Image (spheres, rainbow, N blue to C red):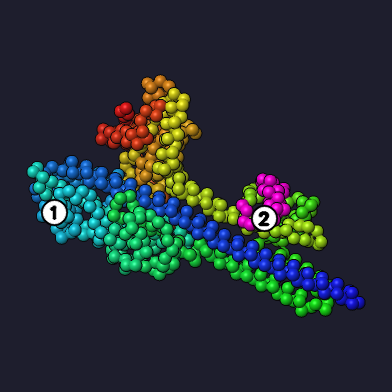
Amino acid sequence: MKDASFTYSRFFSLTMLSGVAGLAGIVTLLVTSLANEHQEADKHVQYEMENISRLLDERILATVQKVDLILRELQSHVRPNDMRLSRKKDSRRAKELHTLLKSQLETVPEVSVLQLTNANGDLIYSSVAQLPHINISDRYHFTRHRDDPAAGLVIFPPVISRTTGKWVLVLTRRLNSEDGSFAGVANAVLDMERFQSLFNTLNLDTHGSIALYDRDLHLAARFPPSEKDMGKVISGLFFEKFLNQSMKQGVYHAKSSVDGIKRLFSFRQVGDLPLIITVGIAEEDYLAVWHRHIWQYSVGAAIFCLLVIFFRLHQQRLEEALRQDEVRFRYMLETSPIAVRIASLSGHKVLFANQRYAELIDAIPDQTIGVDPKIYYSQPQDYEDALQSLSRGERVTNKLVELLMPGGQLKWALASYLNLKFGNEPAVLGWFYDITERKVAEEKIRLLAFYDTLTELPNRRLLNDRLGQAMVASKRSGRYGALMFLDLDNFKSLNDTHGHGAGDLLLIEVAHRISSCVREMDTVSRFGGDEYAVVLSELNSDKDKSIVEAGIVAEKIRVTLAAPYLLKILQEDKSECTVEHHCTSSIGVVLFFNHDASMEAVLKCADIAMYQAKEAGRNLVRFNELKT
């Protein structure tokens, strides 16, 4: 009995030592997994926010550039004598200028009002039908242009418009008399509600935020809205110190100065403009799963500790305690929130699998026992590599594996492996953390970065890439390619009459119609607003024939887009009505060949051709030729 007691005692000691070592290994594995999960969550959110802030930067910069182009055109169209006329609305010249200002609004939906003020600050021309009596001689942008002839484009801090009564950003350029003296100011009023509506379309979880500031940190637009802070200088903004160091973009953790919520922020200066965009995702949102896992892992570790302590207190009943411990250990694995699998090292057969593992591979738990675990890997070599690493004494943690389901579906998991003995047989314990949803989310982020969210067409960034590929292919094949720019001629009136929901339906239908007119190898892109672009590749090696081919496609698109649109609109009373809308397009076309010109030159040439079509009466196709 003494020998038996000694044997049991020694066996218990070895078992306890193994249990403590196993617990330490599991705790180490869990801590490592949690640390890596936190790092991955931070990296994932940072990548998502940088993409969103970059997209918003491009969108806002494009809007400001369009507005500046309009203001420059007004500088060239407005005559010095126009600024000396009276406010009479019935004068011929006043009507011409009103029509000019109103037509320019169609190209930039974000602009709510275009207006001209004379040298005294009096509003004398406006795109608004009822010309209000307004004087802006006290506004900063007026005095800046009056006192500084070289001021260029001036962006006024956010202010409540005296014309619309809403929060706006005002972009202005100076108007000169014949002798170069100050004659007045051309004003473009950007409605901040449009930007807040844009911010609202982006999914940043429950407590996310997007904000637009000017360089002096006045709040111009924000989602969720904060009316009490609009137009005010927001103090304590963390990114201010980065701006003072001449940094134009960055990522940081901080508590919001507006609502006090702690977020991970990405900030970016909009081009070289005095505007800053910030995108923030709350830590309580993107780390929610991580916090839940801490609790789950702690519970699992606590259960394991209790099992070891319980085993120690029942030393006198060693054999029964060993059996009980095995039952409890199996129960812990079976109820673990993490997918767990134990496979034999020699026979490559599954010895144990919990419910979470069966759910991971879309199988019934009993059907997983005795099966070769490699059949669930899309790349079986991944499992062989893990076994080889374990045989060399290396740790294998958070290894990304692609799992193949019985129905052919793919899932992704972070797998960790550990050598152990199961029923006196050498085995491998595997933990699997399902990250399929994260991979799907990353794919959605990729689509957000390269595709237009409304029409699902390639966006401007992907268009540039496709155009570059087409130009390289042209040089390789000796065939011409073509780039088309299309602009809708009667889009703004639909938005004004039936709202932006109707406009969105029209933009989607236009995308479908254009796509139906081109080959699968060609690229159709939404360039921005109501502008689209088409890249035709692999045309003829003969220039004249290529012009004919491109012209046929352009004319087909023009005719297709001119057909009436039947749009089903949901009204305020939830009833549906059908609206018939007529909308034509102005199309500019340019051929490119053998990489003879830069991509920027091709884009500019197509844009000029499109505006030539507009100026010639719209609903037309115009070709432009690259100058080499």
Q: Is 497 in front, or is 536?
A: 536
Q: Residue at x 78, y 61 (%)?
A: 422
For residue 147, the mark is 1
Q: Is residue 95 left or right of residue 166?
A: left
* Quadrant in the picture for residue 214: bottom left
Mark nearer the N terminus (2 vs 1): 1
- Crowding near the residue tagged with mark 2, few <14, some 14–19, many ≥20 C-alpha atoms within 10 Å: few
| Count of marks placed on residues | 2
Residue 474, how many percent across, how many down? 44, 28
Are the residues at dot 2 and dot 1 in contact (C-beta closer than 8 Å)? no
Q: Is residue 441 left or right of residue 570?
A: right
Residue 299, how many percent across, how many down? 64, 71
SS category of the residue bearing label 1: helix
Q: Quadrant of the N terminus?
A: bottom right
Residue denoted by label 2: 394
Instruction: Read off the magenta span.
Output: 374-400
Residue 69, how many percent across, how many down? 26, 44
Q: Quadrant of the C terminus?
A: top left
Mark 1 belongs to which amino acid?
Asp
Residue 479, how many percent across, how many down? 43, 24
For residue 56, the mark is none
